[in-house]
Amino acid sequence: MALPLDGVKVVDLTNVLAGPFCTMTMSDMGAEVLKVENFPEGDLSRRLSPKINDESYCFAMVNRNKRSIGLDLKSAKGKEVFMKLAAGADVILENMRPDAKFHMGVDYESVKKVNDKIIYASISGFGQTGPYAKKGGYDIVAQGMTGIMRMTGDQGGRPVKVGIAMNDIAGGVTALYAILAAYIHRLRTGE
């Protein structure tokens, strides 16, 4: 049975939850997803508990149906391999701080030089520009900063984290529909 994204090649430069959730959904729709993990540590979520058979449930949950490769993107060889992967990809998704991707040379403009048809999506806690752009963002930080934690728990009590990582999942879904819209646009216009 054909799936909607059969034949679509995705390079996944994401960690933890928001990005991996997005690319997991794309892989469920048939996309071929190659997860590029930092070498030698791998995705940050590999070290989170609980673990089943020495594998992090948090990692396994959102990285199903993906192949994985470890690259040191700070090295010339790692960047060279990444650019070869980018040249053959339809989509790249990353969730790095903006300064990190520019420093490593894996930003949109650098990738566009080897693949001018690439759909390049970025997920970040505080956007690509502005006063907080260089700060890392996690779901719990967004819950605290937006005040949602004041709406959970007991009235008058301490702030309480929402039971699920709602912002990470919302970020992943938002990235997904933006990528799909860009893909449909490219199919229609070639751009």
Image: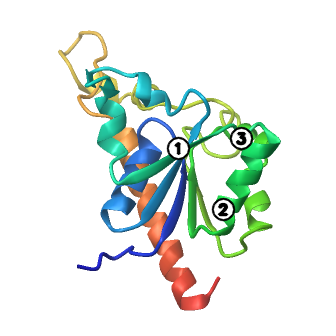
- In the depicted structure, whether residue 27 falls above or below residue 35: below
Q: Which residue is drawn at 38% across and 40% down?
A: 167
Does residue 11 show up? yes
Q: Where is residue 8 in the image (x, y as percent from the top left)?
A: 47, 72
The amino acid pointed to by label 1 is Thr
Q: What element carries label 3?
A: loop
Tell me if 135 is positioned left or right of 109 in this view: left
Q: In this view, does 68 lie to the left or right of 162?
A: right
Q: Residue at x 54, y 38 (%)?
A: 125
The residues bearing labels 1 and 3 have C-alpha atoms spaced at a distance of 13 Å
CA separation in Å, label 2 and label 1 = 14 Å
Other residues around mark 1 within 10 Å, as few (<14) / some (14–19) / many (≥20): many
Which residue was labeled with disc 2? 86
Nearest the viewer among 40 and 60 is 40
Quadrant of the drawing holding the N terminus? bottom left
Q: Can residue 107 be seen in this view?
A: no
* Sequence order check, earlier mark of 2 and 1: 1
